[in-house]
Image (spheres, coloured by chain):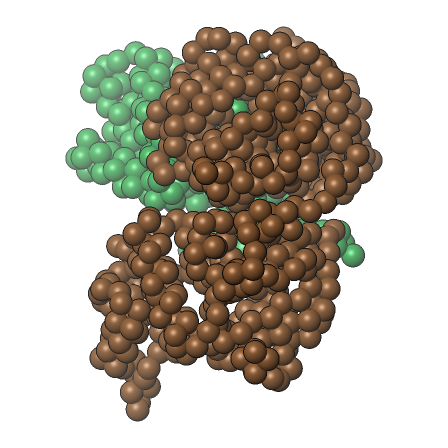
Chain colours: A green, B brown
Amino acid sequence: MKKLRFSINNIATLVVLLVLLLVMSILSPVFFKSANLINVMQQVTVNAIVAVGMTVVILTGGIDLSVGSIIALSGMIMAKMMVEGDMNSVAAIFVGILIGAVCGLINGFLIAKCKLQPMIATLGIMQVARGVDLTIAQGRTVSGFKPFFRKIGVGTIPGTTIPVQIVLMLVIYLLIFYLLRYRKFGRYIYSIGGNEEATRLSGVNVERYKMMAYVLCGVTAAIASVVMTAKLNSAVPTAGEGYELDAVSSSVIGGISLTGGVGSLWGTLMGAMIIGVIKNGLNLLNVSSYLQQVVTGIIVIVAVLADAFKTKAVGRKKSN
Amino acid sequence: MKEKLILEMEDISIQFPGVLALDHARFDLRRGEVHVLLGENGAGKSTIMKILSGINTDYSGKVIYKSEEIQCKNVQEQKRRGISMIFQEMNLLRNLSVAENIFMSQRPTTKIGNIAWKTMMKNARKLLDSIGSDISEKALVSTLSVGQMQMVEIAKALSYESDIIIMDEPTSALTEKEVDNLFRIISTLKEEDVAIVYISHRMEEIMKISDRITIFRDGKYIATKDKTETTIDEIIALMVGRELQDYYPRIQVKPGDKRLEVKNIRQGNTLKNLSFYAREGEITGFYGLMGAGRTELMRAVFGADTIDGGDIYVNGKQKKIRSCKAAKDSGIALLTEDRKHQGLVLDFDLNANMSVTNLAKIMNAFGINSKKENRNSQQLVDIVNVKTPSLKQVVKNLSGGNQQKVVIAKWLNSESSIIIFDEPTRGIDVGSKVEIYKLMNQLKKEQKAIIMVSSELTECMGISDRLYIMHEGKITGCIDEDRIRNVSEEEIIKYATGSADE
């Protein structure tokens, strides 16, 4: 019954995506060109990677508003170390991801151990991380990376035309899908979102798994930062602003319930693609970026309303 | 006498899902008396008073108040008529002042509709003075002690110029001094011809302040006695008064070693230095009335709540149990009383609910294997006999009895050697009850140590091999295996009401 509802949900999201693709290709002749499709995918990757961690956090019944600032902070430190410190790219990436993990650990500690509201804790860390980022950056953009690093953002897999960043994104999705579906981690994450107290009383170390969820979210934000910094060939102090909202929107459009315990990662991926396609389509149709925000906002609301409506309908059917 | 009657309730019945909570019950009340309502948990005492105060409205029967037949339809209307109820869990807004709480729904106002603060404060002061309380009317409720809050509740009831005040276990959280103070106030109220309904389990209190005592049992009216014409023993006999039914299928197993031993466990005001043990091949029962601390004790042993001190030994080895995980890893299982909120994830299916206690069992090198999971779940479902169309059924859609079986299955899955059942048969039908007893017996045969907490006396006597009785955070009595067959219910109730000291 549970699985059935998930798949209906995923199919619904998939249908929306396909309809969008169809509409866009009718409205704009260049949309379905393979160059543009790859373009869409490339626009999607950063948000889609951030949304993975966000989904895991939302599945526990929480939220992480600090991902945008984590992107900026870890990107800025990575860039400084590579450009000004002349550090090896791999080592710098490692440090960047570590910074994401530490931010996530602080979030998780505040939420799981100190019992702060996720919204408040991550709102605080969002400000702190942004402030540290701006202080380090001193208002300057850092750019000029080695070719190896740039490849992550703009390179292709040798011998093909497949962008590295898309492969990276898919690998992350597969990995987290595996964790959620086949490991204890996933079972506990869903269970915590479904009923935290019952999960604790089942002998699960709830605090530990909640902390792991936020660490994972920090790590995926940092990975997204690597991709974005490499793509732009620069680390911008104000990078990542508003990305938390895109990530939450992707999850919600994909059917992840904000109360926790319900939804699947494939939904999130489709949610991210829907947002990407709409943005790309509106670009092609020369709609201003200001209006694009209006459209994205409306879509999130419609998605949540549709979900609420569906839940109500299911509830009614049951009570009859 | 007749003209002093202020209230008559006749032929009152009310149906809750699955049970007839009140079965043609009756109750009457005279001006200026303290009338005690007495009965075991679930006898229907609170239920009939909730009808009178306008909370349970779906009743049938006749209520005559001040010689007029009335319908008890809502709380506000009943309060205006002069009927107020003070609840066990108090209904005060903690962040408001005492005066604001007293005049919660009837704020005095000025001509243009502003709140008349001065009048309100003055009236609050008057009310508090009238019950001899020195609490400041301006104090925030959150700064008060539980006893003081009780005073505020009483003042609030008086603000409606109540003729009937219902007190549901008012002394359960009070200190001795506060109880004395409350009794003084009750006598004052009596002199002013206010009728008081007093629900309590404490025998000594009841004998001290009551004028008449009405006894309920299983939703039925049993008797009303004048205090001067009765004894504690007679009252207890009336409260219990039934034969042990033979649907308790006890089996004989020779008990083995002590699996669990708890020494001097303490927790704030709820657990006061308790020690007990549970042996394998034995069902250790815990009986007590509401608020005796049984659930708190089991939660403490299971590491669900923090304790102030005490030692826990599992199989003779001392264990530090600071979390439920630690308890589970030591081989303890707790089937919580509140299965909906604490035992199950209602929106998840049977598989997810049962597997969570032991995922290692359904994993292979790759991870969780759904074939293994289905096989394991099917075995569990067969053992406890859950009636479900499939393992993918969402547990929310199962009946109470089947949900309880899923909880049992979930903990069987953990392969624990010490299994604590907290109210395992509450709210489920008789058929499922017997099945659950049989399961417990089966586990007993498998040399598990079983602990069963229950509020049903007959169940405790029928199933347990040894029985501990609790009262106000202490173990007040223990019936061992030699005596469990022929102990009287009266004796147990004496321990449970703390009146066995003489």
Q: Is residue B28 above or below residue A172?
A: below
Q: Is residue B493 above or below residue B109?
A: above
Position of B126 with respect to B371 (left or right) is: left
Position of B115 with respect to A308 (left or right) is: left
Position of A40 with respect to B262 (left or right) is: right
Residue A26 in sight in this render: no
Q: Is residue B321 above or below residue B100?
A: above
Residue B493 in sight in this render: yes
Image-quadrant location for residue A193? top right
Q: Position of residue B168 (x, y in %)?
A: 49, 58
Q: Residue at x 25, y 71 (%)?
A: B129
Q: Residue at x 56, y 63 (%)?
A: B226
Residue with the most extreme front position? B229
Q: Position of residue B150 (x, y in %)?
A: 36, 59
Image-quadrant location for residue B321? top left
Which one is nearer the viewer's eye here, B441 or A268?
B441
Q: Position of residue B423 (x, y in %)?
A: 62, 36
Q: Position of residue B60 (x, y in %)?
A: 72, 70
Q: Quadrant of the N terminus of chain B?
A: bottom right
